Each structure stands twice: as C-alpha cells, then as structure tokens.
Amino acid sequence: MNIPVRLSRAIHLVSAFWTLGLALLIFFDVAGRGLLNQPIPGTKEIIQNSVVAITFLQLPLAIYTGSMLRTTIFADAVPLFARRLLRTIGYCLGVLFFIGLVLSTYEPAYDAWRIGEYEGEGALRVPTWPVRGLVLVMSVFGAFAYLAMIYYDWRGQLVKENEAPGSA
C-alpha cells in the first residue's frame, strides 16, 4: 500500500478518536447538566468546530476507498473502458471541487490566524484558525487523492474498481 493511502488511514484513525472524545464530552456535558446543573463551558463551540474538522479528516480515505457518493446506474451498464472514463470524469470534478475549496478558504484561514479569530464568549474561546487551516490542508489532500486515483485507475493499479489502490 502506498504512502498517501497509509497517511489517509492514519488521519482517519485520528478522526475516529476525535469522535470518541466528542462523544465523551457530550456525555459529561449532559450528565453535568442533568445531575449537577453544571454544564461543561464551551461544549457547543468545541463540537461546532470539531464536526467540520472530523468531516474533512475523513475525506481522503473516502476518496481512496471509493466511498464518495456516486451513482452506478450507468457504470454497471457500460464496458470497462467506459466505466473508467466515467470514473475519470468524476475524479476530475472532485479535483475541481477541492481546488475551489482551497482557493476559497486560503484567505479566510490566513485572516483567522492573523487576527486570532475565535468563537465563544466567557469561559472558553475556541480559535477558528486550526479548523480553517485543517479544511485548507485536507482540501489539498483531497485534490491530490483524486489526481492519484486517476493515475491508479489508468495504470490498472486498482485491485477492485472501488477500493483503495493495492488494498488486496
């Protein structure tokens, strides 16, 4: 298995543990509210930023494993070359989408870092630049993943049409 796929699996693992941490935070916040009438300050802001981050952390592996949303109604009815061509068109659209995200998030991410933007008031202020930066970096990785899938597909390196390269 190649390095980008391994890296995307490791990043996915980080997102899984992050999700587990959020579940515990929510549990303790709800328990604190119900039992002690004392919620955990900043829970809303942490969850709000974490959901976006977790989603973007999971994107590269979803791309490499063929788990992104797709329709097989045409792909199942055409020969291999046409399926490969349809996948390539989809991959190119994915590259364009993520390049658009990179271009549209670069400046806001930089500004958030430069001015120290945060969300929340009072007890906990959550900086927004880490999440904005993560969206930017994972969008670059997503575009790269789609480009890599085009390469792997046309080189015949996909074991199955919809699985990670070399995942046998």
Image: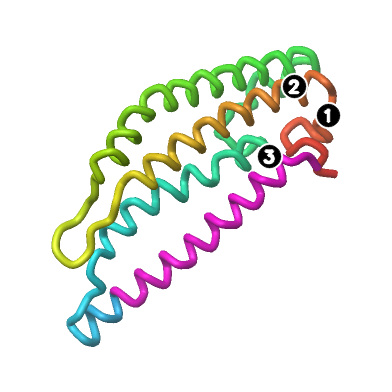
Q: Earlier in the sequence, mark 3 or mark 1?
A: 3
Q: Amino acid at mark 1?
A: Gln
Residue at the spot x=74%, y=41% of the render? 3
Q: Earlier in the sequence, mark 1 or mark 2?
A: 2
Instruction: Quadrant for the C terminus, please.
Output: top right
Q: Amino acid at mark 3?
A: Thr
Provide the residue designation for mark 1: 157
Extreme residue toward the left, this view: 122
Contact between marks 1 and 2 (CB within 8 A): the answer is yes
Relative to residue 10, is residue 111 drawn left or right? left
Rendering quarter of residue 133? top left
Q: Is residue 35 above or below residue 95?
A: below
Contact between marks 2 and 3 (CB within 8 A): the answer is no
Q: CA distance from mark 3 to mark 1?
A: 13 Å
Residue at the spot x=41%, y=22% of the render? 103
Provide the residue designation for mark 3: 65
Rendering quarter of residue 145? top right
Confirm whether the magenta stretch covers residue 4. Answer: yes
Provide the residue designation for mark 2: 151
Q: Report helix, strand or loop for mark 3.
A: loop
Residue 156 placed where, x, y %?
84, 24
Confirm whether the magenta stretch covers residue 96. Answer: no
Q: Badge 2: how crowded within 10 Å, few (<14), some, or many (20+)?
A: some
Q: Amino acid at mark 2?
A: Tyr
Q: Which residues are magenta?
A: 1-29
Foreground: disc 2 or disc 3: 2
